[in-house]
Image (spheres, grey):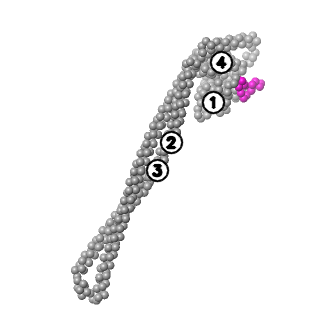
Amino acid sequence: MMFMVKTKQKMKSRTEEAKQKLFLIAAIGLVVFGFVVSPLARADQFDEQIKQLQADSNVKQQSANQLQVQADSYEGEINRLQGEIDGVRALIRENEAKRDDLQKQITAAEEELGKKKILLSENIKAVYVEGQISTFEMLASSRDLSEFLDQQQYREAIQDKIKSILDTINALKAQLKEQKTLVEKLLADQQAMNEKLNAAQAEQSRLLAYTQDQKNSYIAAIRTNKANIAELRRQQLIANARFIGGAPGSGPACGGGYPARWCEVPQDSVLDTWGMWNRECVSYTAFKVAASGRHMPYWGGHGNAYQWAYDRDGPGGVPGRNAQNAGIPVDSNPREGDVAVSNGGTYGHVMYVEHVYGDGTIFISQYNAGLDGRYSERRISASGLLFIHF
């Protein structure tokens, strides 16, 4: 799909091949000379700033992580306090119900006591009236001595019974009041505990909000740093692109800072600095690596995408070991700035990793994904790809 060695190119005369080799040698000489006379913009203008921003972001991320741990601790304490608050409130409701029930019992006892007092009052009156009669008169009015004794015993029994009832009711009332006092004291203690727990929870909530604000400020600063890094890299790419191959192209096929001299001409019509045909995926990724200030080896003549990684041979058994032979690490773990390699298809495909997400996907830029020699961007899964760490 990518760097395609065309049949017509294989048929070129030795003279044309010789001219092409001379052109490549001259191009390499210019590049080497350019490195000596005018170093890439990344050396002085951008790399140090990018490193400082990345280091600052790393420090802020560590602080944000620590604050998150603290925030989790506060949230745990808030939840624990809420459990205690709920328990105390349940006890308060239970004791309030007990207090109300005791008050009802006290009220009932007082009502019963009032009734018994009235009965006692009437009895006392009767006793008083009878008390005005002398024992001789009571005896004289009785038919016999037995009737006299029965009247006297009945009167005394009534008095004792009423007195006993009054004593019982008073004792119950006193007991109920004592229980109510204890319940009210317990309620007061529980209310105080509830207020204390609420205050502690409010303080934990305040600390949590403060911690989250601090964490959010760090996260915002990290986002700002990322935006600044992206802008620095954009400026670096433009500056290095001008040095490597001229100003970035603006035509309909162009994008990613790829120079106009390569993207605004027909596909596969010129060779780039690294011996790749223009507007191919390999040419674009080679440009991106070099434009970021890293060394991009000259891989002309072995520039098909499947030749960039280390685990596949191409048609006819041509080995694909460019990165391995150059000592460049290759694995399945993506990083920003890597070249992602897909070994599918006849020629394979390479893409430039712009960003790595935490969900196993990456954002890539590429050329010729649709066999049209055009620039495009996509978010794709990193699964099944190899990544060259230039």
Q: Is residue 329 visible?
A: yes
Which residue is identified by label 1? 334
Whole-percent x and y of residue 52?
A: 54, 25
Quarter-wise, where is residue 337 in the image? top right
Q: Is residue 333 magenta?
A: no
Q: Secondary structure at mark 4?
A: loop
Q: What range is drawn magenta here?
A: 310-325
Q: Secondary structure at mark 1?
A: loop
The C terminus is located in which quarter? top right
Give the CA distance from mark 2 to mark 1.
33 Å
Q: Residue at x 77, y 24 (%)?
A: 316
Numbered label tally: 4
Q: Give amino acid for label 2.
A: Ser
Question: Crowdedness of circle 3 by 10 Å Cα count: few (<14), some, many (20+)?
Answer: some
Q: Residue at x 55, y 18 (%)?
A: 45
Which residue is identified by label 3? 84
Depth check: 249 or 74 in front?
74
Which residue is identified by label 2? 73
Q: Is residue 71 above or below residue 3?
A: below
Q: Give amino acid for label 3.
A: Glu
The N terminus is located in which quarter? top right
Q: Is residue 254 visible?
A: no
Give the CA distance from mark 2 to mark 3.
17 Å
Question: Crowdedness of circle 4 by 10 Å Cα count: few (<14), some, many (20+)?
Answer: many
Q: Give amino acid for label 4.
A: Asn
103 displayed left or right of 347:
left
Q: Residue at x 60, y 13 (%)?
A: 38
